[in-house]
């Protein structure tokens, strides 16, 4: 169904048609503060569109949830590192 929806252009982001998280629901990807995100990260590690997802999350500075196998905090570190490297170039 996800892939059909992707082919029909029903997703804003075409790679979402192949997202494994769409098969399990959002629960594990939005852990409460202090909760473990291991299940979500394990799913992301097997997801065929993980690089696209992470690129999107970094580019949009997605502030919530697990995207591309990273938490909000991990993405903030990656973005800060990228911004710092860009400023010093
Ligand atoms: S990498 Fe994770 S959050 Fe991104 S589409 Fe795949 S399963 Fe979903």
Image (cartoon, rainbow, N blue to C red):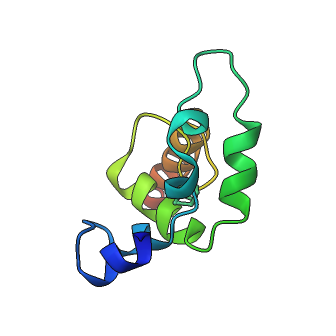
**In the figure, is residue 19 to the left or right of 12?**
right
Q: Residue at x 76, y 51 (%)?
A: 42
Q: Position of residue 32 (x, y in %)?
A: 57, 18
Which picture quadrant has residue 36?
top right
Observer-nearest residue: 63 or 35?
Answer: 35
Q: Position of residue 81 (x, y in %)?
A: 56, 49
Q: Position of residue 74 (x, y in %)?
A: 61, 40
**Residue sitting at the far top:** 34
Q: Residue at x 59, y 66 (%)?
A: 50
**In the figure, is residue 31 to the left or right of 46?**
left
Marker count (numbered): 0
Observer-nearest residue: 60 or 86?
Answer: 60
Q: Position of residue 18 (x, y in %)?
A: 50, 72
**In the figure, is residue 80 to the left or right of 9?**
right
Which picture quadrant has residue 11?
bottom left
> Eyeballing the image, is 44 above or below 71?
below
> Eyeballing the image, is 36 above or below 32?
below
Observer-nearest residue: 89 or 62?
Answer: 62
Residue 81 in sight = yes
> Eyeballing the image, is 11 above or below 8?
above
Q: On the rendered image, what quadrant is the N terminus found in?
A: bottom left
Q: Residue at x 31, y 84 (%)?
A: 7
**Residue sitting at the far front:** 1
**Residue sitting at the far bottom:** 7
> Eyeballing the image, is 3 above or below 47?
below
Q: Give the image quadrant in which the ligand numbered 1 is located.
A: bottom right
Residue 89 in sight = no
């Amino acid at each position: 169904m996800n892939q059909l929806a992707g082919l029909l252009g029903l997703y804003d982001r075409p790679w979402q048609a192949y997202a494994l998280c769409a098969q399990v629901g959002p629960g594990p990807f939005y852990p409460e503060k202090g909760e473990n995100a291991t299940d979500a990260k394990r799913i992301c590690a097997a997801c065929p569109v993980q690089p696209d997802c992470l690129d999107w999350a970094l580019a949009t500075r997605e502030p919530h949830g697990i995207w591309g196998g990273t938490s909000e905090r991990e993405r903030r570190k990656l973005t800060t590192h990228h911004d710092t490297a860009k400023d010093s170039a």
